[in-house]
Image (cartoon, rainbow, N blue to C red):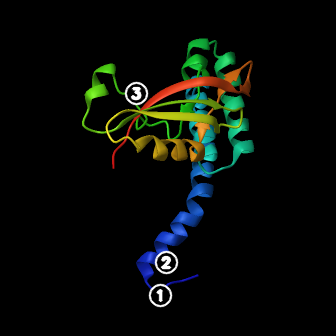
Amino acid sequence: MFTGDPQLDRLQTLRRTAQGDGSRLLEELAASAPAPEARAEVLVALGDWQQWHGREGPARAAWQQAVAALEAAGAPERIAAFFGEPRELPDNGVFWQPPDADLQAPRPLVTARFEVNARGQARQVDAQTASGRESAYIGVARALRRLRFRPRFTGGEPVATPGVERRYEVYD
């Protein structure tokens, strides 16, 4: 298990423990949040963290707690913002949607249509290159099948969302 390189060994140890440490820190932060909306926001982050690490059950539980906290706070607009449509993870802005004007961008642009199931997985992926290198759609289709999503929620439960359409700029 150990390589003999102290820095590499430390990095590997951090990687192995990061999921549990991150979950624990987010749970502690949610428990100490001063208001229901703040708690819900941390619970969304906790659910995203769990989903990112392949822990669908704990992710769903955290998201359901977030929905319940937002319902109790009377914040339906926040529920719609977080759970109104599937979101690629990480939900940190990396998956922004390029404007129509970018159809002539020098980087390949791929359009994709797919379903996000209730488990947060892309299925029935159909991708096509809109501009740039013709084969760019292949990598996007493969990546979408591996990508984790925060699914759309209806009535406090995750639901499948067919017909999701996105455009992805490809950086090689």
Q: Quadrant of the N terminus?
A: bottom right
Q: Is residue 28 visible?
A: no
> How much space separates mark 3 and mark 2, taking CA atoms?
39 Å
Q: Is residue 80 left or right of residue 118?
A: left
Answer with mark 1 or mark 2, whichever residue precedes in sequence.
1
Identified at 68% across, 24% down, the residue is: 153
Label 3 residue SS: loop
Q: Which residue is mark 3?
A: 97
> How much space separates mark 1 and mark 2, taking CA atoms?
7 Å
State if disc 2 and disc 3 touch (CB < 8 Å): no
In the rendered image, the vertical position of residue 125 relative to residue 13, given as above or below: above
Q: Is residue 86 left or right of residue 97?
A: right
Q: Nearer the viewer, mark 3 or mark 1?
A: 3
Nearer to the camera, 90 or 113: 113
Q: Residue furthest bottom?
A: 4
Identified at 44% across, 81% down, the residue is: 6
Q: Is residue 152 left or right of residue 95?
A: right
Q: Residue 142: image x %, image y %?
A: 54, 47
The amino acid type of the residue labelled 2 equals Asp
Answer with mark 3 or mark 1, whichever residue precedes in sequence.
1
Answer with mark 3 or mark 2, whichever residue precedes in sequence.
2
Q: Residue furthest front?
A: 134
The amino acid type of the residue labelled 1 equals Gly
Identified at 61% across, 51% down, the residue is: 53
Q: Which residue is mark 2?
A: 9
> How much space separates mark 3 and mark 1, taking CA atoms?
44 Å
Nearer to the camera, 92 or 163: 163
Q: Residue 34: image x %, image y %?
A: 57, 29
Q: Which residue is mark 1?
A: 4
Label 2 residue SS: helix
